[in-house]
C-alpha cells in the first residue's frame, strides 16, 4: 500500500502543479489579449477621428455678411468728415485716398 499512496500523492502534486501553471498561463494570455484589444480599439478610434476631421478642401460656411444698408450711413458720415478735413487742408490727397480705401474696405 505504501507504493499506492506514493503514486496517488505524486499524481496529486503533478496535477496541482499543472493546474496552477495552466491558471497562470491563462491569466497572462487574458491580460495580453485584453491589452491587444485595447490597442486595436484605440487605433480604430484614432482612425475614425482622423477620417471625421474636415478635409483641406472643405471650409465651414462663412457667416453671412452684414447688410450694407446698416453700414451705409456711418461710412457716408466718415467720408464726409474726411472730405471736410481735406478741404480744410488738414489732410493731403494721399492721406484722404488711404483713409477712404480703409473705410470702404
Image (tube, rainbow, N blue to C red):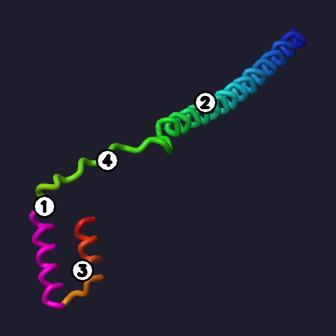
Q: CA distance from mark 1 to mark 4?
A: 22 Å
Question: Which is nearer the N-term, disc 2 or disc 3?
Answer: 2
Frontmost of labels 2 and 1 is 1
Q: Looking at the rendered structure, which numbered label has been put on residue 96?
A: 3
Q: Looking at the rendered structure, which numbered label has been put on residue 2?
A: none
Q: Quadrant of residue 91?
A: bottom left
Q: Position of residue 19 (x, y in %)?
A: 73, 21
Q: On the image, numbered disc 2 is attached to which residue?
A: 37
Q: On the image, numbered disc 4 is attached to which residue?
A: 62
* 80 in relation to 55, above or below: below
Q: CA distance from mark 3 to mark 4?
A: 32 Å
Question: Which is nearer the N-term, disc 2 or disc 1?
Answer: 2
Please state if 61 lies on the left or on the right of 104 as rendered: right
Residue appearing at x 11%, y 75% in the figure: 80
- Check whether the beta carbons of the residues at disc 2 and disc 4 lie within 8 A of each other: no
Q: Looking at the rendered structure, which numbered label has been put on residue 72?
A: 1
Please state if 45 lies on the left or on the right of 10 as rendered: left
* 2 in relation to 16, above or below: above
Q: Position of residue 10 (x, y in %)?
A: 84, 18
Amino acid at each position: 500500500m505504501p507504493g499506492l499512496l506514493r503514486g496517488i500523492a505524486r499524481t496529486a502534486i503533478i496535477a496541482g502543479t499543472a493546474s496552477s501553471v495552466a491558471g497562470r498561463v491563462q491569466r497572462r494570455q487574458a491580460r495580453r489579449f485584453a491589452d491587444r484589444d485595447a490597442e486595436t480599439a484605440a487605433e480604430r478610434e484614432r482612425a475614425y477621428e482622423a477620417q471625421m476631421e474636415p478635409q483641406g478642401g472643405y471650409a465651414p460656411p462663412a457667416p453671412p455678411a452684414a447688410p450694407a444698408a446698416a453700414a451705409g450711413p456711418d461710412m457716408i458720415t466718415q467720408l464726409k468728415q474726411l472730405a471736410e478735413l481735406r478741404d480744410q487742408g488738414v489732410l493731403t490727397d494721399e492721406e484722404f485716398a488711404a483713409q477712404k480705401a480703409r473705410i470702404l474696405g
